[in-house]
Each structure stands twice: as C-alpha cells, then as structure tokens.
Amino acid sequence: LRGGRCRVGIREVPSIGFPEKGRNSRAIASFFGDPRDGGSRDHHGVDIFAPRHTPVLAPSNGSVSRVGEGDIGGRYVWLYDSKRSMYLYFAHLETREVERGDQVLAGQLIGTVGNSGNARTTAPHLHFGIYSNGPIDPFHFITETDTVPDRIAGDTLLLGKMVWTSPRTIIRNSPATGSISFDTLMMDSLAKVTALTGKQYRVQFSDGSSGYIAEERVEQIRDTKENRTYPGSML
C-alpha cells in the first residue's frame, strides 16, 4: 500500500423533516435551554421564526394525540411519532388544521405559524418541542451540518505506545473545549496512548482508568530501560 493523505468530513443529517415549509435551521432564533421568565425556567424547545400563516408541516408520520389552546402555548398540536417513541409539540399556531385522532403523514399540513398564547407580543414563530421521557433538544433532529474534525496535532506514532505524563497533568473526561477535569497527576505517570483527537491524547493507566490529556503533557519513552520513580496512576 502507498502512503497518502485524506480529509475526513462528518455530516449530520436530520432524522425528521423541518416543521416549517420553505424554512431551515437558520430561522431558529431561540434555542433549547435558553432562560425564560427571568431565569425561573428553561426553554424546552426551539423557536422558528417565519411570516404569519407560513405552513407548519408534520416532520414525520404520526397520530395527533392532543390539540387545544392555552395561555402559554396558544393554539397547539401534539403529534405522537410511534416509530421513534416521542411526542412532537407545535405551539403559538395561528390556525390548526388537524384534530385529535387524525393520522398524518410526514410533510402534511397541521397548522400555520402565528403568535398565539404568551407569544402575542413577539413576532410570529413556531415553538417546536420534542418529548421522550421529558423534554429533549430538537435541534439535531431537524438540522443538517457538515463538520471537519480538528486537525490532529499530536504524534500518531504514539498510538498504542507507553508514554510518560508530565507532573501536574490535568485529566479530562472528554477532548471537548470546556470539558470537566476530574483529576490531576502530581507526579510522572506511565500511561498507554489509545486514541488521538485534535490536541488531546486519550490515555489508559495501569488500573484501567482513562481520560484525555493535552498532547504537550506527553513524553515518549525512548529508552526501554529508563527508570523513574513514579506512583503509577494517581486517578
């Protein structure tokens, strides 16, 4: 085999349709978890802004489990997606085009965008939520993204090799920015490199524990007879 270079891309595709006709995720202006009522509660959905009377479409096949009108959600529809065992919630509708018990197909009209309920002082939009044993973020169900993984900065030749970690090395639970640090190695420790992503090595210690450390905190063992005083894993 000849050597070479390749570029890896990761595409995240929607698992259900977008709930507004002619719109996409760029129309989302309020996200899951945003504070509401002065921080007393969290937003359990996404708000998708569109002109009044924009068609609201069923993102998947399902049955209408509930319809109604309330002070908060205004005119609303609940749709049960039995394939995925989750409920889809559509609120602040201007009009409702389905009734309880209706069987609908993906792409079918179920209502139109409005600002009913507690949204009457805001621009027309659809509040869209997903529930399955509680509220879950709808964003990744309806959004398509293209992602290029971070460039690998560490030495790939260390994969599967034993290395020393520098004193006062911070161990994290994931390579993501802002990930939680759950321990610090106060002395040199011996570890095995099991993976490499961006500027982080995933290492495993002699007791079976593992975590992520910055690539500059790793030193290759160059002499198999090298002897250091070390306590093993400090985790």
Image (spheres, rainbow, N blue to C red):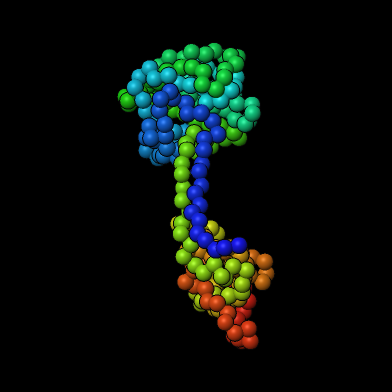
Q: Quick one: quadrant of the C terminus?
A: bottom right
Q: Residue at x 55, y 59 (%)?
A: 173
Judged from this view, the residue extending furthest toward the right is: 207
Q: Residue at x 61, y 65 (%)?
A: 194
Q: Quick one: quadrant of the N terminus?
A: bottom right
From the viewer's perspective, is residue 111 above or below residue 87? above
| Image location of residue 5, percent across then percent down | 50, 59
The foreground one among 142 and 31 is: 142
Q: Residue at x 61, y 87 (%)?
A: 227
From the viewer's perspective, is residue 27 above or below residue 120? below
Quarter of the figure with residue 187? bottom right
From the viewer's perspective, is residue 96 above or below residue 133? above
Kindly tell me whether residue 62 is visible in this rendering. Answer: yes
Count the marks: 0
| Image location of residue 37, percent across then percent down | 39, 35
Q: Residue at x 48, y 21 (%)?
A: 57
In the picture, measured across the screen, residue 77 lies left or right of residue 124, that is right
| Image location of residue 223, percent across then percent down | 59, 84
Kindly tell me whether residue 93 is visible in this rendering. Answer: no
Judged from this view, the residue extending furthest toward the front is: 2
The foreground one among 155 and 132 is: 155
| Image location of residue 89, percent across then percent down | 51, 26
